[in-house]
Image (cartoon, rainbow, N blue to C red):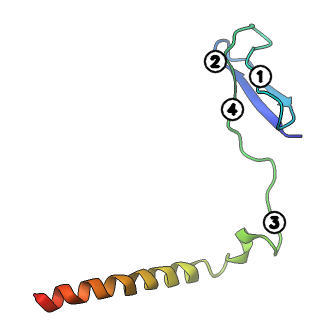
Amino acid sequence: MPIYAYKCGSCGHAKDVLQKISDAPLNVCPACGAEAFSKQLTAPGFQLKGSGWYATDFKNSGSKPAASTSSSSESAAAPAAAPATANS
């Protein structure tokens, strides 16, 4: 079960809550009772490591896919540019 971070917009009370994904979000602050309790956006608590993950598969060759993408876009742009220079 994930841990969600909540913070009250009225009093500033913060709390981490262990909840199921299917549980409804909390709305009422346990400290002041106001209905200003909302989820906070937090960073994930894990990191994908190892040779089988996408983030590390292209670590050394990250420019190769970008170069092939830009060269294909350049070749797509080249036919459009060629008639324009031929008419000039």
Q: Which residue is mark 4?
A: 40
Q: Quadrant of residue 32?
A: top right
Q: Secondary structure at mark 2?
A: loop
Q: Residue under circle 1?
A: 26
Say which quarter of the image contains residue 73: bottom left
Q: Earlier in the sequence, mark 3 or mark 1?
A: 1
Tell which tag, 3 or 4, sits nearer the viewer. 4
Find out whether the residues at labels 3 and 4 contact each other: C-beta distance under 8 Å. Answer: no
Is tag 3's residue or tag 2's residue first in the polypeptide sequence? 2
Describe residue 39's horizontal placement relative to residue 75 as left or right: right
In depth, the one of 38 and 82 nearer the eye is 82
- Residue 76, given in percent of the width and then of the height, sits at 38, 83
Q: Which residue is mark 3?
A: 49
The image's mark for residue 7 is none
> What residue did someone put label 2 on?
9
Q: Quadrant of residue 12?
A: top right
Q: Is residue 68 left or right of residue 1?
A: left
Q: Earlier in the sequence, mark 1 or mark 2?
A: 2
Residue type, mark 2 in image: Gly
Left or right of 56, for residue 69: left
Labels 2 and 4: the sequence-earlier one: 2
CA gap between label 2 and label 4 equals 11 Å
Estimate the x, y position of residue 84 in percent, counting from the top left: 18, 84
